[in-house]
Image: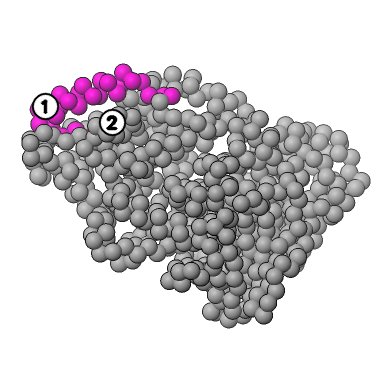
Amino acid sequence: MPLYENRDNADNVVVLNAEARRTLAIGTEEVISRIVRDARPAASGKAPFLALDGYYGVDWPAIEEKITREAERLGIPLQFFSARAFFRPQAELAAIKKPWITDDPGFGCANLEGRLSEIIDPAGVAAFTRAREEARARGTTVVLTGPGAAYGDLCTQADKVYYFDKTRQPLLWQMWDGDLVPFGAEKPDPEYGWKEYYYYDFYLLHHHKNDLVTRMDYWVEGIDPASLKLVPRDVYDTIMRTLVRQPVKEVKIFQPGPWGAYRYRDFWDVPGLECNAWNELAGPELSMLVKVEGVEESLNMPAMNLMQYGEQFVGPWINEHLPGQFPLDVWLDDGYFPTPEPAERISMPIHNHPGTDYVKRRFNEPLGRYETYYIAEAYEGANTWMGYTEEANLEEWERKCRDSNNLKEIPDWKDYIANWSSVEGDLYLIPPGTTHGHGGNQMILEMDTCPSIAGTEYSFFAYDFARNSWDDKSKTMTGKPLKMHLDHAFDNEKWYRASWVRDNLRARPEVVQWDRDFVFERYASLPEMPFEIERCHFWNRALLDTRERYMHIVTLTVGENVRIRSRTNPDTIVDIDLFQSAIVPACFGSYEFLNERGGRATVVILRWKQG
């Protein structure tokens, strides 16, 4: 699955004092120098033990080579060990993972409570411990590398613990290219499957990282061995505590697809992206750039690192009832075409999403997929597919979808699926089991629940017009047709007719607050929808408040740029551009939007209902 990043206006500025800034190591040469400095024998003559732990995808051989060269230059004897020796044989690992990967071709079962102890052989750790002490007795510094290097008692036994972090997107690129080295393996496994990562390995890595974040000595940006950055833990904690008290912007990602469109070209320069099906503006799988004032290069880290302070970030209700979850995400679904195109080119697949009961029962996920489509821009022919026509034979539709399996066309598909014309500001509610799809000729701000912090999206496709999908290598629509999820789609289907959609899912806004500065509106909702969609229109200034209970995800949909400023700490200011989101932490309290560019501005707000 191709994926592109865009870092425009993505820096999150943090101010550190001069003493804290001096403790940072920016650049591989300086980071390696720090590590090798810690590798020197103590005054007593005892050789140290360094644990270099980290996430999947870190290039350990390259890092080991750089450490070796510097240690040899300084005459420090080193011996490297790999934590891969701790893991059970590959055949055993496959058997342990199989119940979670499942035989379902599209989905698995999330190992939410998974820990490294499930797949580590204590005998391997014991063997390393003996070899480590033998090496240290010879005066040789021991450096243990890889995921699990600070596992269990090794964390307290190590003289220094480094955690090499990696953001999600570069890891996925490695996985899709067959270059990822999984647990216990010596080399990349080209057969390593995405389900193995999303449903099993992710949770072991996630919990292990959470265990180390308060015990490590150093956090290291380990995305690129040629551009390492190191932060001592106390300074890292200061950065996290600062970020969780200010609006946070994430690095946008873009994905082409068979309905990919072209409005993005008017806003962002994304080298290599030839069409845009959607791009994610906010969510748990994105990264964030941290610009320490006075330091030239930004730090790049997973935004989920902020969940160390979950109550302050997502709010007390979410933190208590959905612990560890970041349950909301925001997408921008492109839909602009310079010339008229048929519906079969510009529409999303006909699909639906599951509710919480379904994903808990089938996939062991904590939260279902509840969606909304907010029409941010509407062009000629703007439309959305949702529900079924009043005359549609629903049993016949299911038979046709199953018979097609997206390999042959259903010529009369429009006779079954209801179509709705759109204008800017329309909001479509999409509760679980609602057949729907972006119809094209519109820009959709999609605001949804996120069932999985791993990033698994539960969309059940029923029909995709038997069209070719996007091939990103040739940059053409010559890929294989998308695979359908017919059993899940029809097991989950609610069969809503157009009249029910009209009366229940075409939400209208209500004015909640008006004054001469701004208008604040809230859209109608349904009891099963767990979040609110709200909106501010203003010329110069608008006032909002998280009430220290609600995380807000705010997106500018009209205007060039607005500032978000704390009313209790006016020095805290973050600006967002058109079609950019910011996460306003629950603890942020009272704040204001400032429009200094002129003209009218509109900000759309996504927040949890319960707080």
In this rendering, the answer to whether 12 lies above or below 391 is below
The amino acid type, in three-letter code, at marker 2 is Leu
In this rendering, the answer to whether 510 lies above or below 252 is below
Q: Is residue 130 magenta?
A: yes
Quick one: SS at disc 2?
A: helix
Count of labels in the image: 2
Q: Quadrant of residue 265?
A: bottom right
Q: Residue at x 59, y 67 (%)?
A: 544
In this rendering, the answer to whether 91 lies above or below 166 is above
Where does residue 428 sit, x and y in percent of width and height? Answer: 74, 56
Of labels 1 and 2, earlier in sequence is 1
Q: Residues within 10 Å of mark 1 (few under 14, many from 20)?
A: few
Do we see residue 591 in this rendering?
A: yes
Do we see residue 583 in this rendering?
A: no
- Image quarter hosting the N terminus: top right
- Mark seen at residue 137: 1
Q: Is residue 197 left or right of residue 543?
A: left
Q: Is residue 303 magenta?
A: no
Quick one: SS at disc 1?
A: helix
Q: Residue at x 64, y 50 (%)?
A: 610
Where does residue 63 sit, x and y in percent of width and height? Answer: 26, 42
Q: Is residue 200 left or right of residue 375?
A: left
Q: Main secondary structure of the magenta part?
A: helix
- Mark 1–mark 2 Cα distance, whole angstroms, equals 18 Å
Q: Which residues are magenta?
A: 118-143
Q: Residue at x 36, y 20 (%)?
A: 121
Front position in the image: 254 or 591: 591
Provide the residue designation for mark 2: 154
Q: Quadrant of residue 352?
A: top right
Label 1 close to label 2 by CB (< 8 Å): no
Where does residue 351 sit, x and y in percent of width and height? Answer: 72, 44
The amino acid type, in three-letter code, at marker 1 is Ala
